[in-house]
Amino acid sequence: MKQFETSSREYKALKKYWKLLLKPAAKLDYKNFHRFTHFKYFTTEVDVIDNLLSLSPELAQVYAYSQRFCGAVGTHTEELRNTLADSVGAPETFETCLTYIREHPDYIENTLRHKDYSNGPLERTNNRIKVLKRSGYGYKRFKNFRLRILIMLRTKTKHPIIK
């Protein structure tokens, strides 16, 4: 985007439709025609992507590699390993990401294998405690604060809560 003037049509198109570049190629709509703001004619999402990629060969290279890489991550770990082995011609923008993945392949494979595990519930609990801490304006005793957290979360403890 930096190679175009901020008032140019190309710059505005890239700025408006950058989310289409992040969308997986398999989910792009190639049948239904829509009116897109920066295009004079009715077009599909695939045509918009083709138009945006024609603006910069570097962008086209990065887009092709990212689609291939995301497809490999979404399918199997063996395909991901093959993609990483072929990453010799990867764009420079991917180097930090690829370096990290090459250094920690076991962790990445473990994450991809166990997709049903998430730290979302733990983050929710931490957020609720922080909100309680902010809205409580400080408790006089930590024991009272702890009790309020346990009551709020409806946590069952092995030991009696109140002593």
Image (spheres, grey):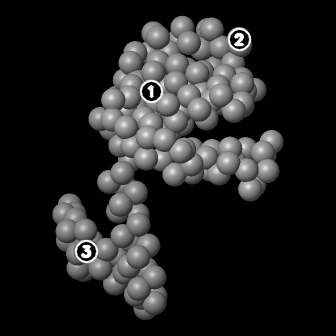
Q: Do the residues labelled 3 and 1 touch (CB within 8 Å)?
A: no
User: Which quarter of the picture shows residue 126?
Assistant: bottom left
Q: Distance between the residues labelled 2 and 1?
A: 23 Å
Q: What residue type is labelled 1?
A: Ala
Name the quadrant of the N terminus. Answer: top right
At x 44% / y 73%, what residue is drawn? 130
Q: What residue type is labelled 3?
A: Met
Q: Which residue corresponds to mark 1?
A: 25
Given the current orientation, which residue lies at the most extreme front position? 41
Q: Which residue corresponds to mark 3?
A: 152
Q: Distance between the residues labelled 2 and 3?
A: 53 Å
At x 60% / y 21%, what residue is drawn? 65
- Using a 10 Å C-alpha cutoff, classify the residue at mark 2 as few (fewer than 14 neighbours), some (14 to 19) or many (20 or more): few
Q: Distance between the residues labelled 3 and 1?
A: 44 Å
Instruction: Depth check: give the residue in front, 12 or 72.
Output: 12
Q: Percent x, y for residue 103?
A: 64, 23
Q: What residue type is labelled 2?
A: Val
At x 44% / y 27%, what residue is drawn? 25
Q: Which residue corresponds to mark 2?
A: 88
Q: In this view, does 3 lie above or below 55?
A: below
Q: What element carries label 3?
A: helix
